[in-house]
Amino acid sequence: MFGLFKSNPVQSLEKKRSKLLEEAMHIQRSGDLKLYAVKMEAIDKLEKEIENLRNSKS
């Protein structure tokens, strides 16, 4: 019952990843490939963190 209000770290990281992916798409379309690479690197780090959290739960 008390776990109902407990935040899920994986969900919050996935939301952040989704937001970064959308930002990266707009940056890529604008032509700033350096900033796009920086965003993609941040997304990659988040994906690894999400994977680690999922593996630690198992």
Image (cartoon, rainbow, N blue to C red):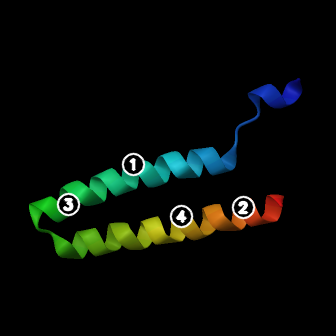
Task: Mark 2: give few (<14), some (14-19) or many (20+) Cα within 10 Å.
Answer: few
Looking at the rendered structure, which numbered label has been put on residue 19?
1
Whether pointer 3 and pointer 2 mark residues with C-beta atoms closer than 8 Å, the reply is no
**Which residue is the site of mark 2?**
53
Could you tell me how far apart the alpha carbons at marks 3 and 4 are, in whole angstroms? Answer: 18 Å
The kind of residue tagged 4 is Leu
Left or right of residue 37: residue 51: right
- In percent of width and height, residue 40 lies at 37, 69
Instruction: Kindly give the residue lying farthest to the right in the view shown.
Output: 1
Whether pointer 1 and pointer 3 mark residues with C-beta atoms closer than 8 Å, the reply is no
Left or right of residue 54: residue 35: left
Could you tell me how far apart the alpha carbons at marks 2 and 1 are, in whole angstroms? Answer: 19 Å
Of residues 56 and 5, the one nearer the viewer is 56
Could you tell me how far apart the alpha carbons at marks 1 and 3 are, in whole angstroms? Answer: 12 Å
Answer with mark 3 or mark 2, whichever residue precedes in sequence: 3
Quarter of the rendering containing residue 43: bottom left
Task: Mark 4: give few (<14), some (14-19) or many (20+) Cα within 10 Å.
Answer: some
**Which residue is the site of mark 4?**
46
Instruction: Kindly give the residue lying farthest to the top in the view shown.
Output: 1
Task: Mark 3: give few (<14), some (14-19) or many (20+) Cα within 10 Å.
Answer: some
Left or right of residue 56: residue 15: left
The kind of residue tagged 3 is Ile
The kind of residue tagged 1 is Lys
Kind of element beneath mark 4:
helix
**Which residue is the site of mark 3?**
27
- In percent of width and height, residue 54 lies at 72, 60
Kind of element beneath mark 2:
helix
Could you tell me how far apart the alpha carbons at marks 4 and 1 are, in whole angstroms? Answer: 12 Å
Answer with mark 4 or mark 1, whichever residue precedes in sequence: 1
Answer with mark 2 or mark 1, whichever residue precedes in sequence: 1
